[in-house]
Amino acid sequence: MTVTASAATVSDFYYGAVTPVAAYLMACLGAALGLRCTTRSLRRPQHRARWLALGAVSIGCGIWTMHFIAMIGFSVEGALVNYDATKTLLSLVVAIAVVAVGVFLVGYRGGSPLNLGVAGTVTGLGVAAMHYLGMAAIHTNGTLHYDPATVALSIVIAVAAATAALWAAVSIHALWASLGASLVMGVAVTGMHYTGMAAVSVHLTNVAGASQSSADLVAFLLVMLAGPLLVLLVAAVIVMFDPDMMLGETEPKASVPVPAPMFGGGSVFPAKQPAEPSQSRGSW
């Protein structure tokens, strides 16, 4: 049966609450690891680049994993959905790259309003680009259309979420405070995703015999997710087993070294004298 540009029923919750909850948890995990890595970069400035890189990879993988776990629940009534593997992987690269730009900017230049504004805008626009590049990877027997106002709102949310995340990265260092911040960041990032999805409508040119992605599609998405999930697992192990990674600023035994100078000559935070000599064990 052939129809001309018929509007299809689109759902983001084919599996109920399973995919949004799992997506949110992945966003929180990536944010939490990123915040702890940034804290370590300020405690050990001699290894700052390594910790910032790990933090950027953690946050980027968390955002990307959130996106594609949520997309497992995406369905188009009367159509099968497939994904272009190249664009899917490219969106992962974009996510990590734009987060790295923002994290390194605030990690080395500090959290001034101007610097946060620039870094947050670049990172937020990049996260939005990752989302819509991932959407461009969708192949179905129809065309996807977007509501401009809702798309604009999703971009604003992405920029605001990125700016807040970068502010938290250089401002929040106590363990429980950073965990709370990661929960809020998870809401913002997941909210950006579902706001962007609310902008989508699908006009079918042909009607397929199935209303949901095949098992092969789910298997494909799970294979795509395997790599970033492994990266998050490795990052979590590094974070958990670093000697004093999980100690907050207020812990009596935590040394607080003076942050490296910003490019402009100041420092990210006011200088603090260490409570006692740091006992470095040579880890990141």
Image: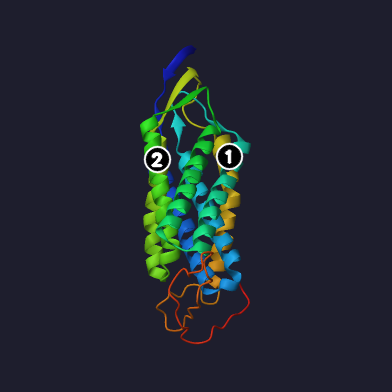
Q: Nearer the viewer, residue 48 or 203?
A: 48
Q: Position of residue 124 (x, y in %)?
A: 46, 47
Q: Nearer the viewer, residue 98 or 214?
A: 98
Query: In percent of the image, x 59 and y 56: which residue is there?
Result: 230
- Answer few, some or many: residues within 10 Å of disc 2's Cα (few below 14, many 20 plus, some between 14 and 19): many
Residue denoted by label 1: 88
Query: In percent of the image, x 41 and y 23: which residue is there?
Result: 8
Query: In terms of secondary structure, where does tag 2 sit?
Result: helix
Q: Position of residue 36 (x, y in %)?
A: 48, 66
Q: Earlier in the sequence, mark 1 or mark 2?
A: 1
Q: Amino acid at mark 1?
A: Thr
Q: Position of residue 106 (x, y in %)?
A: 49, 60
Q: Amino acid at mark 2?
A: Ser
Name the quarter where the C terminus is drawn.
Answer: bottom right
Residue 154 - label: 2
Residue 134 left/right relative to 160: right
Q: Report how far apart the C-alphas of labels 1 and 2 lie in the structure.
A: 20 Å
Q: Nearer the viewer, residue 160 or 236?
A: 160
Query: In terms of secondary structure, where does tag 1 sit?
Result: helix
Taking 25 as reference, is 200 above or below it?
above
Query: In percent of the image, x 54 and y 71: which residue is there?
Result: 260
